[in-house]
Every structure is written in structure tokens, then in C-alpha cells.
Amino acid sequence: MPLDLRQRLSEFSYGYGVTREVQAALESIGLRPVPFLPSLLHEAEIGCDVHFAKPGLPLLLQFKLGHELRHFRRSDTSKPAPYLDKPFWRFEVETSEVDGQYDLLLKAELSGAEVHYVAPRFADWDNYAAAFQSSDVLASSLLIAPSEIDRKLQAEGEPDGLHKVVYDASRVYVCSEPRRVKEERIEQIALRLKRKIEQENQPIAKTLRRVFSGFDQRRDIRRSRIREEEFIKEEEQKYQSFAIRAGFEMLGRSPEQIAFARRRRIESFRTFARSDDDATFAALGVETWAAGCQLVAVTNG
């Protein structure tokens, strides 16, 4: 029976340990990280700790708690299984959902943010507590960029859909068909962030606006022929339902309505934020937080 880590450890607890160590790693090389917290929305100055005029980039950390496994089972036994030591771990990513979690993360990365899934290589509270106490949470975790998953799926001609990321202590694969992908360490990420900030030399406020605007872009979804037929059928059913019920529910799910809600959200923040930069930081932070993702504004120290 696979062990569900979520029964023993919350994403909040794990995310706190990860964020604390990410801050320390960035500060150790002279960067200044400021995590977004929902409590900032109740402060008089939403982004009071962010130096928006300084060169910087947003960092997004998507926490994933998965299953610990000891056997890799396939419905099609003719296909190869990835080589994995035991135990190993698994979490899922849905790459075909428009404006879903993966879609937002990939669009943020393509717009200039540094984005990573972060998942633990342990499965109980005692191991987490020990890693937290010794500041080894990141050393005991997987870090992988959404673009790395996307590149591997595209290279192998795999359609978008529900894919599993499986990994042991040293290897990581994306399945359906097992394709080995590259992970990174926080030291690499921190140094790349510092280099990009110095090379681009743009105020972080500009990049935050670009990433927020990038959420409205439509990404091409790669579907198999069968999935494409199912998608068309689903859209036809939605349209019929829309026509019958005057469309109020369906309008809320359309990309246009999602973009409209996004614009209304930032306008509401502008009514009490100190500046437009604060409002953008809040709007981006709220949307990514709702997707289970930690936004960190990273600038030169």
C-alpha cells in the first residue's frame, strides 16, 4: 500500500521549511528574497519589504507532496519501467488544463520567472523534523522546472495530459513513457538567479508585470487524436449547457472571463495599495498562492 505523505505532513509545514532554506541560500550570495504572504494584504503597505526599483526576478516554488512506493506497476506490461531504487516517490502533473496549475507555472517561467516544483525525498514527520532542524530540507528534496518536463514531453512526441513524475534518491523520470529528466540543486538555482539579475539589470517591478500579463497568454495544448475528439465533445456540451442556462456559469470558466477576473483583482488591490508595483506583487502573489505556489521576490541586496 503506497504511503501518502499528505496524511503525515502538510504542504504548509513542508513549504515553510523549503522557503526558509531558499531564503538562506539566496541571502548567502548577496540576494534579497521577500516571500509573498497572504497576511500582507491586510497591511497598510503590501510590498513594503520589496525594493521594486532594484534589479530582480520572481521565484515561484510549487510544493508537491506525493506517495512513497516500493513497486512500479504499469497497466501495459509490455512497456519498460524506469530504473528506480526503493523506496521511490511519485506525484502527478496535469499539463493539459488551461489556466491550471502547470499551465500557470509554465507561462510564468516563459515570461521570465524562475519556477520549480519542489518535492520531498522522505515520507514521515520524523525525517522532516530532522531535516528541518539540520537545514537539510532542500538537500532531501527534488527541484525540477516545468520547462524541463515540457521539453521532455515535446521531444518524445507525448501529448499533454496527466503525467506522473517518479523519482528516487538520484534519478527522476516523467511518465507515461518513462523519460529521464534533469533536476537541479538550490545552489545552481541561486547562482543562476544572481547571474540573470545582473545580466538583465531590470527592475523587478517590470518582470513582475510581465509575468502577471503572461498569465493571459494561451498556450498550445498537445492532445492525442482521441483526447482531441473528447475535448471537442466536451466543448460542444459546454456550449449547449451555456445556451440553455444563459451562460453565467460557463462565462466564469472561459479564458476571457478568467482574464477579466484577473484584471478586476489587480484593480481592487490598486484601491488601497501604496503603488501600482505593490498591487502587481499582491495580484501575482494571490493567484500563485491559490494554486499552491510560493512567490518570492528576489532582488540584489
Image (spheres, rainbow, N blue to C red):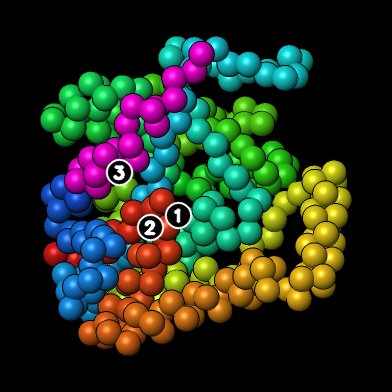
**Contact? badges 1 and 3 (CB < 8 Å):** no
Determine if residue 92 is in view.
yes
Tell me how far mark 2 sits from mark 1, CA to CA.
5 Å
> Quick check: 51 left or right of 120?
left
Give the magenta range: 1-22
Looking at the picture, does residue 96 appear above or below residue 272? Answer: above
Labelled disc at residue 291: 1
Name the residue nearer the viewer: 108 or 37.
Answer: 37
**Contact? badges 2 and 1 (CB < 8 Å):** yes
**Kind of residue sitting beneath label 2:** Trp
Name the residue nearer the viewer: 60 or 173.
Answer: 60
Split into 4 quadrants, where in the image is the C terminus?
Answer: bottom left
Which residue is denoted by mark 3 in the rendering? 12
- Density class for disc 1 (Cα within 10 Å; few <14, some 14-19, many ≥20) is some
Q: Residue at x 55, y 12 (%)?
A: 71
Question: Quarter-wise, where is residue 290 in the image?
Answer: bottom left
- Density class for disc 3 (Cα within 10 Å; few <14, some 14-19, many ≥20) is few
Please state the horizontal and vertical placement of residue 18, each as a whole percent of the image: 26, 42
Labelled disc at residue 289: 2
Q: Residue at x 33, y 27 (%)?
A: 8
